[in-house]
């Protein structure tokens, strides 16, 4: 390759990366908004007699995975009696288009018996590669924050408001969050933690159903209603935000001390 072509190719790759296109997902471009094509007819299938009406096109299309986001069946989700069953349901769910571009499902990490559950926003690149929430730089900071109040992975259960990485780490759409929300609600119900910690404004807004900013929500005990009881809930700053704005760690530290105090035997 000539030097000028090489330079042009490098400049193009750098531009892609700046736009958030930082990895090759497949050989051919994928149009997530395209109407799915009809399945070709099975070659050996006998053609229907002329008097039998063909099924309407819509019913064939509906049988294929969703091209965009759709809500899961809440009553089916309530049948999941364990976190493992729920994870299997999430893995089989085709209603969130992010599943098509993500490498892995990031359901949770930590201890299923934990008293404290933490919820972030969305998996990033490292999480997608490892199939676990909060394992990249933000996750490492989160682990250090937890360690500062004596908590290790075995003491916590960590998940996100959505289970698949949005391409290029873009902000999840409201539809993507909504598609995953019934699973997350059941996940909270099954874990039944004493304390819920919401990491960042996006998680706080979607779990608490508020439009209040994180700086107003943080630093005070709130409640999340779950299966007829209230879970003590604290919103705090997201570790990724703290990586960008370390001077605000003092607020997160105050919030962590509230969690520590709440976990102490009375
Ligand atoms: N940020 C999140 O909100 N979740 C992760 O899992 C990683 C980074």
Image (cartoon, grey):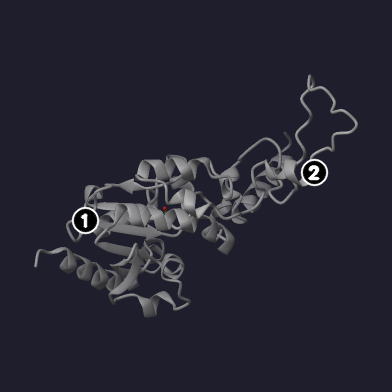
Q: Quadrant of the N terminus?
A: top right
Q: Quarter of the image holding residue 230?
A: bottom left
Residue at the spot of label 2: 57
**Residue at coordinates 41% horizontally, 58% vertically from top-left?**
185
Looking at the image, residue 159 lies above or below residue 264 = above
Question: Does the rendering let one see residue 124?
Answer: no
**Disc sitting over residue 161 in the figure:** none
From the top left corner, tell me how far across and down residue 143 is, in percent. 28, 54
Name the residue nearer the viewer: 159 or 266.
266
Q: Is residue 64 left or right of residue 220?
A: right
Q: Residue 38 in the image: state x and y as whole percent.
A: 77, 38
Asked which secondary structure carries label 1, the reply is helix
Residue 15 visible from this viewpoint: yes
* In this rendering, position of residue 105 left or right of residue 141: right
Mark 2 Cβ and ligand 1 under 8 Å apart: no
Residue sitting at the far front: 51
On the rendered structure, is 48 left or right of 137?
A: right
On screen, residue 254 above or below 81: below
- Picture layout, residue 79 above or below residue 219: above
**Which element type, helix, strand or loop, lies under badge 2?**
helix
Marks 2/1: CA–CA distance: 56 Å
Q: Which mark is residue 147?
A: 1
Q: Earlier in the sequence, mark 2 or mark 1?
A: 2
């Amino acid at each position: 390759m000539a030097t000028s072509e090489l330079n042009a190719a490098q400049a193009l790759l750098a531009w892609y990366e700046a736009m958030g296109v930082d990895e090759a997902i497949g050989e051919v471009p994928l149009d997530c908004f395209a109407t799915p094509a009809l399945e070709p007819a099975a070659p050996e299938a006998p053609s229907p007699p002329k008097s039998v009406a063909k099924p309407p096109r819509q019913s064939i299309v509906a049988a294929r995975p969703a091209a965009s986001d759709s809500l899961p069946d809440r009553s089916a989700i309530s049948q999941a009696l364990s976190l493992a069953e729920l994870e299997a349901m999430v893995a089989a769910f085709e209603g969130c288009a992010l599943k098509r571009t993500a490498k892995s499902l990031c359901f949770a990490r930590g201890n299923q018996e934990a008293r404290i559950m933490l919820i972030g926003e969305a998996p990033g690149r490292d999480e997608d590669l490892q199939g676990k929430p909060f394992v990249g730089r933000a996750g490492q900071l989160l682990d250090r924050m937890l360690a500062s109040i004596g908590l290790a992975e075995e003491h916590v259960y960590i998940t996100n408001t959505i289970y698949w990485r949005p391409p290029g780490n873009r902000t999840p759409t409201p539809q993507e969050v909504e598609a995953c929300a019934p699973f997350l609600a059941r996940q909270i119900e099954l874990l039944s933690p004493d304390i819920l910690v919401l990491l960042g404004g996006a998680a706080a807004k979607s779990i608490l159903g508020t439009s209040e900013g994180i700086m107003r929500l943080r630093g005070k005990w709130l409640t999340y209603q779950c299966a007829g009881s209230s879970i003590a809930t604290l919103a705090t700053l997201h570790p990724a935000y703290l990586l960008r704005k370390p001077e605000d760690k003092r607020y997160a530290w105050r919030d962590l001390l509230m969690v520590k105090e709440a976990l102490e035997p009375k």
